[in-house]
């Protein structure tokens, strides 16, 4: 062995790849072996052929200190949210959620009553969304609380919506409103800092009910899947807004090999989010584009469906699909055309 040979094993920081780069790196050589695997890695759910229909499977993990802060997150809300974020991925395939499994790692600072509270939220979400809790795993953790949930759902073969089906000229539609969950988080963090500096201070949460609820107790849009079904609309593509509108639109466009134009003046933003953004000196449109955790559905539909959705208070057309060479464009209120990026902070704030 040469003295010059470098025996130090290579150590590439994961931050060099980022979350999506890492997933891509770890999964790029997977070859599907079973004919029943219709879709593997790369969408909101895996899709499995189960005969007459497709089964949908998705999993998400929530880690204390990364995804939630127990200083201001009630455990019941946390249990509820842990289920909802998983169900959201089932609805993002235009499917119906049926079962979940729940795995938890607990540190010894949790008494039984705390775990019971967490499960109250889990059971409530199962009841509200008509989902059965069918199993899981329980273990200990040397650091914080960890919750991993797998959701299983069903979609008919004709109805399933992937990230990859958007076509040029399709309309881009989003449910509900955007940016509120992020602004709710900013308020919670602000009040936490105030409290840490002066524990006798009372939190100033007046008029913030809606945005706090969007952060602490989000809902998944089961109703939107039902609404589309009642209108006999099958989206050409769909994704849920967990990381932020920009990031999700870029996923849709990349997977569908298309471009898009999104209009700032069309973004649905609740008035309480707008006033909170002003109060915090943030740009509300930037919060809507990059905030994340809204758990709304973002989808594309053929233009022929416009008349059928245009007056629905749950749905907003925010732009349209273009050809890939036109790029992914954000059109500001003053008609400035900017490239849509997953970190739009620098461009419009
Ligand atoms: P979502 O935000 O909808 O939950 P993610 O961005 O977490 O989706 O994941 C993107 C895709 O990568 C999904 O298909 C997911 O199943 C897959 N994935 C994520 N992490 C891993 C992993 N460690 N190994 C294999 N596949 C993964
Ligand atoms: Mg998703």
Image (tube, rainbow, N blue to C red):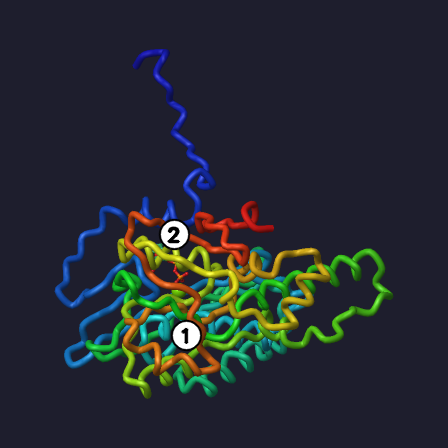
- Residue under circle 2? 328
Observer able to see residue 137: no
Q: Is residue 2 left or right of residue 62?
A: left
- Residue under circle 1? 87
For label 1, the SS is helix
Q: Is residue 25 left or right of residue 35?
A: right
Residue 250 found in image quarter: bottom left
At 37% from the left and 84% from the top, the residue drawn is: 227
Q: Of residues 106 and 301, which is closer to you in this image?
A: 301
Percent from the top left, x then y, of residue 307?
Answer: 35, 81
For marks 2 and 1 on the same chain, the one whose residue lies earlier in the sequence: 1
Residue 148 found in image quarter: bottom left
- 127 over 201 or under it: above or below: below
Crowd band around label 2 with a 10 angstrom C-alpha radius: few (<14), some (14–19), many (20+): many
At 52% from the left and 70% from the top, the residue drawn is: 268
**Label 2 vs label 1, nearer the camera:** 2
Percent from the top left, x then y, of residue 100?
Answer: 39, 76
């Amino acid at each position: 062995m040469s003295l010059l040979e470098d025996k130090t094993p290579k150590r590439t920081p994961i931050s060099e790849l980022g979350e999506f780069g890492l997933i891509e790196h770890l999964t790029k050589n997977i070859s599907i072996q079973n004919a029943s695997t219709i879709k593997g890695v790369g969408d909101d759910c895996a899709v499995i052929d189960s005969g007459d229909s497709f089964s949908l499977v998705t999993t998400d993990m929530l880690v204390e200190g990364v995804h939630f802060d127990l200083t201001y997150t009630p455990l019941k809300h946390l249990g509820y949210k842990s289920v909802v974020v998983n169900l959201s991925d089932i609805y993002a395939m235009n499917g119906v959620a049926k079962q979940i499994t729940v795995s938890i790692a607990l540190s010894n600072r949790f008494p039984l009553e705390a775990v019971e509270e967490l499960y109250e939220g889990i059971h409530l979400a199962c009841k509200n969304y008509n989902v059965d809790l069918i199993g899981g795993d329980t273990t200990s953790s040397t650091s914080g609380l960890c919750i991993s949930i797998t959701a299983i759902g069903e979609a008919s073969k004709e109805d399933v919506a992937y990230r990859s089906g958007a076509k040029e000229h399709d309309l881009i539609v989003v449910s509900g409103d955007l940016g509120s969950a992020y602004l709710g988080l900013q308020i919670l963090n602000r009040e936490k800092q105030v409290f840490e500096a002066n524990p006798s201070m009372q939190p100033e949460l007046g008029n913030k009910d809606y945005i706090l609820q969007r952060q602490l107790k989000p809902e998944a849009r089961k109703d939107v899947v039902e609404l589309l079904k009642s209108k006999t609309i099958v989206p050409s593509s769909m994704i849920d807004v967990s990381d932020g509108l920009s990031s999700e639109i870029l996923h849709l466009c990349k997977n569908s090999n298309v471009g898009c134009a999104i209009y700032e003046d069309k973004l649905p933003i609740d008035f309480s989010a707008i006033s909170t953004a002003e109060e915090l000196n943030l740009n509300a449109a930037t919060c809507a584009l990059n905030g994340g955790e809204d758990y709304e559905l973002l989808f594309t539909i053929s233009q022929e469906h416009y008349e059928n959705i245009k007056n629905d208070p749950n749905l907003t057309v925010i732009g349209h699909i273009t050809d890939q060479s036109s790029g992914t464009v954000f059109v500001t209120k003053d008609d400035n055309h900017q490239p849509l990026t997953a970190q739009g902070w620098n461009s419009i704030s």
